[in-house]
Amino acid sequence: MKSKRFAALLIALAPVALPMAAQAMPQVGDIVGTNPEAAKAALEKAGCMVEEFEAEDGKIEAKCKDTATGKSMEVYIDPASGAVVEIKDED
């Protein structure tokens, strides 16, 4: 009986959980774009508030803050494809 209640609760909460999933940090392989406006919009939509961009080792580095945790992150973007190639905690 408890498992049926739990399943009903999960189904009831599913519409609430979906928007939160949309706020996950970008993932390696996500295409965010190569120009600053497109990349910033895509990263912020994914929950990574961009503070600045800079060039680093032939990649675009976006310094941003994870809106879910408040942690500072570095997201590296391939300048040719606009794909996220690496994500690191900012030390």
Image: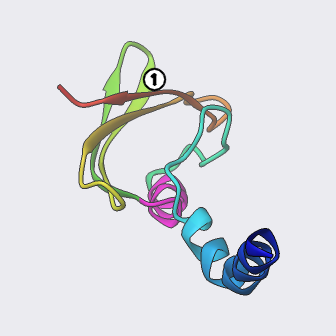
Q: 74 or 9, which lies in front? A: 9
Q: Is residue 50 left or right of residue 19?
A: left
Locate the N terminus by quadrant: bottom right
**Element class at badge 1:** strand
Q: 2 or 20, which lies in front? A: 2
The residue beneath circle 1 is 59
Residue plotted at (44% across, 52% down): 36
| Structural crowding at the residue carrying mark 1, measured as other residues with C-alpha within 10 Å and reported as few (<14), some (14–19) or many (≥20) | some
Segment tinted magenta in the rendering: 37-47
Q: Residue furthest left?
A: 91
Residue plotted at (67% across, 44% down): 31
Q: Inspect the magenta stretch and tell me whether residue 8 lies in it.
A: no
Tally of marks: 1
At which x and y percent is residue 8? 78, 82
At which x and y percent is residue 40? 44, 57
For the residue marked with disc 1, what is the amino acid? Lys
Residue plotted at (30% across, 30% down): 89
Q: 5 or 33, which lies in front? A: 5
